[in-house]
Image: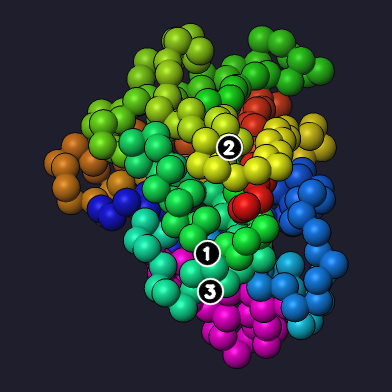
Amino acid sequence: MNEYILARDHHAIVRLNHQHFIMKELYGHLIHPSIPLDKEELKIAVIGTGSCIWPADLARHISPRACIDAIDITLEQCPPQSWLLKNINLIVHDVFKPFPSEMLGKYDIVHAQLLICVIKGNNPREVIGNLMSLLKPNGFLQWNDLNVDATRVFPNTDTDFLLKTAATEEMIRFIMKPRESSNFKYSKLLLPSQDPYAYYITHFWASQLGLQFANMGLSDVVFDRHYIAEDYRLAWNMNCVMLFEEFSARLEEDTTSEDNPAIAAQLRDVVIRASRELRDGAAISSELVVAVGRKA
């Protein structure tokens, strides 16, 4: 299995687009308000463009003279170039590799989002450095991501404080158990349903992204945290269920370990039970973060 743990099929595209609009509402913006947008001919790079929904949405809210380069390691989830507004360009590039010289120092704004699945060794510094190389002097880097450390499961006390959440906790712990070489390495991952706070994860870099920006030399750093509003809980919970369904399908396809089919079957069963709990009022509490910094 390659480093990307989720699917890239039509179900994944729907999930990404659904997720985009939830997160847009919770953040309250596409571009952070500390980043000026008064320039007519902005050049913007979007890293990890996925289904291209973020740049497509942004293009409708900024000057049509802005240029948006939508970049990802594969464009198989993107619409055809001809379907996009004319100021959006699709580019294939791996963010872990240096960018070509013609892209260096080109952009006023670089936006990265949801790289939590691919950052290795709990260290985003290599990626931050590559992203900074794209910026013009005084250009801004914005990185939105999920702080998995802060994920919690709790019952809806308005209905029943004894509501069962064991399956949902087990599902979440599937990504919360420490891995070896990367964030998501598979090896008999599912744990007994015990204290959900007794396990620690290896993704804490997201909670320190603002500090990482400052340490890498970015100035005017802003770091904000956002949480799932109550009226968006069901939408977010079901999006999480879809994500774990993708995860189990990808595990089943993976032939690198003979244990993976059994783990995938176990996860599918957990997801089915968790989805019932989430419909009954259990909730997944997640923390969305955004870091912004300016290149000198």
Which residue is found at the position 48% from the left and 32% from the top? 205
The label number, if any, that marks residue 214 in the structure image: 2
Near-viewer residue (283 or 270): 283
What residue range appears in magenta? 66-94
The CA distance from mark 3 to mark 1 is: 22 Å
Left or right of 180, for residue 81: right
What residue is shown with label 3?
78
The percent coordinates of residue 106 (x first, y second) are 57, 72
Above or below — where is 61 with respect to 206? Answer: below
Which image quarter: residue 17? bottom right
Q: What secondary structure is found at the residue carrying circle 3?
A: loop
Evaluate if marks 3 and 1 touch, with contact meaning CB atoms under 8 Å apart.
no
Counting from the top left corner in percent of width and height, residue 294 is at: 66, 50
Residue 48 appears anywhere in the view: no
Judge the density around disc 2: few (<14), some (14-19), many (≥20) Cα neighbours within 10 Å. Answer: some
Q: Is residue 114 magenta?
A: no
User: Within the image, what quadrant is residue 268 found in?
Assistant: top left
Q: Amino acid at mark 3?
A: Cys
Residue indicated by mark 1: 134
